[in-house]
């Protein structure tokens, strides 16, 4: 079903960790409708974090139905559907297409010990050279290794292993597939953009190779919406469906990483932080000595996105906001986070720069970029009696900015311009601090739903609406980018002098983190 004058809407599905969204875009990239459903998952003992696969599909159907109700003409106008979603994880189905068990999410840490042992062994370097990605417990490869040791009954009933978006694509089209970005992630070859037997051998999951589906590039190949899926979603049978790349790649595409200027980075500031550069060939990929970060094929031939991910970004800000809310509550004063955020930028920018050092490693899962440490924890250095609450908040934002610089440095030279997206992208204070800490101009992407937009862009090229991704990006991305804001020179100079201390302090803290983790583990067993 090709796009026609009446079929002028592309629907992008973004099945995230927190929310499942269905978003409608006009042919020129304008967002014309959206419907969201809160996602649901369970956190269980032993580091298990699982999601009900059947409910994920039901919630996606509800999101599409909700979008259809918001846009009553949607069924007659839809030209294509694209789907992306949360990355990593392990979603197993049997030969009949039924879920074998709840999905293991990227938050699941049961494979952490396997990963820690592997990363300290002699096979780690060879694996990193093939995949371009440091091994982490969130990834499908280590999770399969854990299941081979502890869940063989489950694997024995499985016929195919998916990621989140692959499961939804299967439910939409009946096709068992994954995309190049996730195929090459933890047991693939990034240069070949596919699964790789040697990578699987290195992490000991050769017996699970039978589970891997075909690799389908949604930029060039689509499949049709089945009659069953059409009946459930209310969308027309036969409409082309494009399998998007993983959500972080779609966010980067929708957020402006693909640009004629090769010296552009993209930072996504949400609960976690993601920092990306675009490599225009496999030879342009910069791997590092610590074997950290990720390399994923980009939805443009020969291009790759390199990324370093920090486990906690706005989680640090939320923590400090909640400290204030707790103190106020003790005095009978109720304040929401939004109440405190209203003047946050003003207060932070009034606080003196570079007074404190903060390492934003507040996640219970430790850190994974640009180093891997399950014991890593946040720390604040330099406190004096003169420091108040807003000095602490400024230090937290500076810590996020230094963490971004740390990540970009691990991938090569620092970018001259950063495209900023995510929940905190609209913070004036964070943008100014980030630009000065990295020494980059900041350009905020005002696109409301960059992930769904990136997926829809893939479908727009796949269905011939655009002949190439650059033309699509010119119309779908560039109008949503603010004018670049240059870093303030004196602030950039101050942060450049302070950054080496940030790195030195985190390196010195590693044995302390281990001692604290051991003490906590011992206390839990008393």
Image: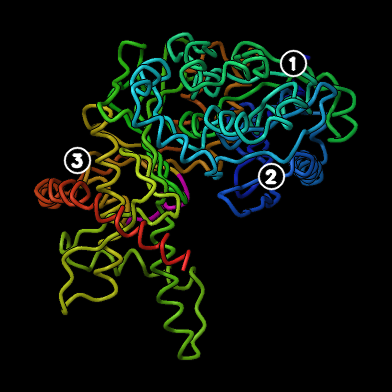
Report the residue at 36% width, 35% height from top.
308
Measured from the top left, where is residue 336 in percent x and y?
Answer: 51, 73
> Which residue matches tag 2?
51
Determine whether, in the image, residue 250 is placed left or right of residue 485: right
Between 69 and 240, which is closer to the camera in this rendering?
240
79 vs 81, nearest the viewer: 81
Q: Residue at x 27, y 34 (%)?
A: 408
Which quarter of the picture shows residue 310? top left
Label 3, secondary structure: give it.
Answer: loop
| Label 2 – label 3 distance at C-alpha | 41 Å
174 over 482 or under it: above or below:
above
Q: Mark 1–mark 2 contact, CB under 8 Å? A: no
Q: Position of residue 521 (x, y in %)?
A: 42, 59
Which residue lies under the disc numbered 3?
439
- Mark 2 touching mark 3, by CB under 8 A? no
Q: Give the extent of the magenta segment.
A: 422-428
């Amino acid at each position: 079903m090709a796009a026609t004058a009446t079929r002028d809407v592309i629907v992008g599905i973004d099945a995230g960790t927190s929310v499942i969204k269905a978003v409608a875009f006009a042919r020129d990239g304008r967002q014309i409708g959206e419907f969201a459903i809160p996602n649901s998952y369970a956190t269980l003992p032993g580091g298990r974090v699982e999601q009900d696969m059947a409910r994920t599909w039901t919630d996606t159907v509800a999101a599409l139905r909700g979008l259809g109700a918001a846009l009553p003409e949607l069924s007659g106008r839809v030209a294509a559907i694209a789907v992306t979603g949360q990355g990593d994880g392990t979603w197993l189905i049997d030969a009949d297409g039924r879920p074998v068990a709840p999905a293991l999410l990227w938050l699941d840490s049961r494979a952490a010990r396997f990963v820690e042992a592997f990363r300290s062994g002699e096979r780690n370097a060879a694996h990193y050279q093939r995949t371009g990605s440091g091994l982490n417990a969130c990834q499908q490869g280590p999770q399969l290794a854990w299941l081979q040791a502890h869940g063989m009954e489950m694997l024995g009933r499985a016929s195919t292993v998916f990621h989140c978006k692959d499961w939804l694509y299967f439910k939409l089209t009946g096709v068992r597939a994954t995309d190049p970005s996730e195929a090459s992630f933890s047991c693939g070859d990034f240069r070949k953009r596919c699964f790789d037997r040697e990578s699987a051998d290195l992490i000991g999951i050769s017996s699970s190779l039978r589970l891997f589906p075909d690799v389908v590039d949604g930029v060039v190949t689509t499949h049709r919406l089945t009659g069953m899926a059409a009946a459930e979603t209310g969308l027309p049978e036969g409409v082309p469906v494009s399998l998007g790349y993983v959500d972080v790649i779609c966010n980067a595409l929708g957020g402006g990483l693909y640009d004629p200027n090769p010296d552009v980075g993209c930072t996504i500031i949400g609960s976690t932080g993601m920092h990306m550069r675009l490599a225009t060939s496999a030879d342009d990929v910069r791997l590092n000595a610590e074997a950290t970060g990720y390399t994923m094929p980009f939805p443009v031939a020969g291009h790759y996105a390199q990324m370093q991910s920090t486990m906690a970004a706005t989680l640090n800000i939320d923590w400090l906001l909640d400290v204030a809310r707790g103190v106020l509550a003790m005095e009978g004063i109720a304040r929401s986070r939004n109440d405190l955020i209203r003047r946050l930028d003003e207060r932070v920018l009034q606080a003196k720069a570079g007074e404190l050092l903060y390492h934003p490693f507040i996640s219970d899962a430790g850190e994974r970029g640009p180093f891997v440490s399950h014991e890593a924890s946040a720390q604040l250095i330099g406190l004096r009696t003169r420091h108040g609450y807003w000095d602490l908040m400024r230090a937290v934002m500076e810590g996020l900015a230094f963490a971004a610089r740390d990540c970009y440095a691990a991938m090569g030279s620092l970018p001259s311009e950063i495209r900023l997206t995510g929940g905190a992208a609209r913070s004036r204070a964070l943008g100014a601090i980030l630009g000065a800490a990295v020494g980059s101009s900041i350009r905020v992407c005002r696109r409301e739903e960059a992930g769904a937009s990136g997926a829809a862009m893939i479908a727009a090229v796949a269905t011939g609406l655009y002949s190439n991704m650059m033309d699509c990006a010119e119309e779908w991305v560039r109008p949503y980018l603010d004018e670049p804001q240059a870093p303030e020179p004196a602030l950039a100079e101050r942060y450049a002098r302070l950054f080496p201390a940030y790195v030195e302090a985190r390196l010195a803290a590693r044995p302390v983190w281990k001692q604290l983790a051991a003490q906590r583990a011992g206390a839990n067993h008393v």
